[in-house]
Image (cartoon, grey):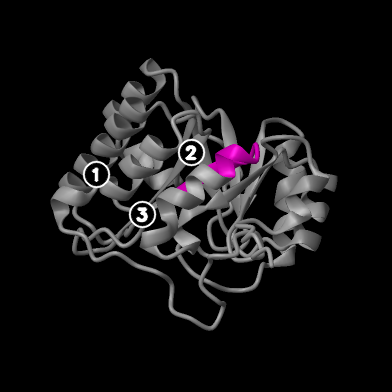
Amino acid sequence: MTAAVHEPLRDWYRAYPPFTVGGSLYAVPPAHRAATAAALAERDCRVHVDIIVDAAGRGLGVSRHELDRARALAPGARIDLHLIVADALPPAATAGIVGATVATAARLGVEAVTMDLARIERCPTAIDALHRSGIALWLEHSPGARVQELPPGVDGSLVMFIPPGTKRSADPSMLTEVGRLAATMPTAVDGGITAPVAAQCVAQGATYIVAGRSLLTAASPASAPAPRTENHREDLP
């Protein structure tokens, strides 16, 4: 009797052109992240990586080691990074993390790095380095921080339907933000994105859909705590 083949992605992504859909590695347990990146790349999906740093400077998202392994297993993957830094982190530490993230992005050949407005405005040296590396800068928009006036040098927008780094249901009011931003620049969506919400976002002009639990079969269930890796500082990007 032939054993059933495990499919790492739910098939709703097939309704869209190649590389319209990406999977969030943060949604799956650390042990599955590199293999998930490879599975996404094999199916013409992008790889989205959340780098989360708390007020104590601890990495709570995808670690540098996990990111390196993902790139090694998926050398041709289209990877983008989303840097989420606690506002309470001291400015010098924040600047160091932003700079290190930009350096990691350049080393691994990622396509884009998303940050919030505060990080973009407070870390001009790192932002200049990002532009010199030819990596796109995307601006985070979230339910609590809808940016009306875009700073110079922004290449795209990432509309979060939930507060970054959390697990909640998507806020449907963010659809209006998708339509507003997509009229002027490439726009991605993330955070609680299900197949029906993805279709609504595409109808509003979104060109990149990031999904976690609704797409990746290895993802933790909604009732489980967010997967975290309590990394030492040296394991941050």
Could you tell me which secondary element the residue under label 2 belongs to? strand
Q: Quadrant of the N terminus?
A: bottom right
Magenta stretch? 40-49
Could you classify mark 2 by the number of other residues whose Cα lies within 10 Å: few (under 14), some (14-19), or many (20 or more)?
Answer: many
Q: Is residue 150 left or right of residue 128?
A: right
**Residue to which mark 2 is pinned:** 80
**Residue to which mark 3 is pinned:** 62
Toward the bottom, the furthest residue is 223
State which tag comes first along the sequence, 3 or 2.
3
Amino acid at the residue labelled 1: Ile
Per the rendering, the mark at residue 97 is 1
Could you tell me which secondary element the residue under label 3 belongs to? loop
Q: Quadrant of the C terminus?
A: top left
List x then y, in percent, for residue 217: 60, 64
Amino acid at the residue labelled 3: Val
Q: Quadrant of residue 175?
A: bottom right
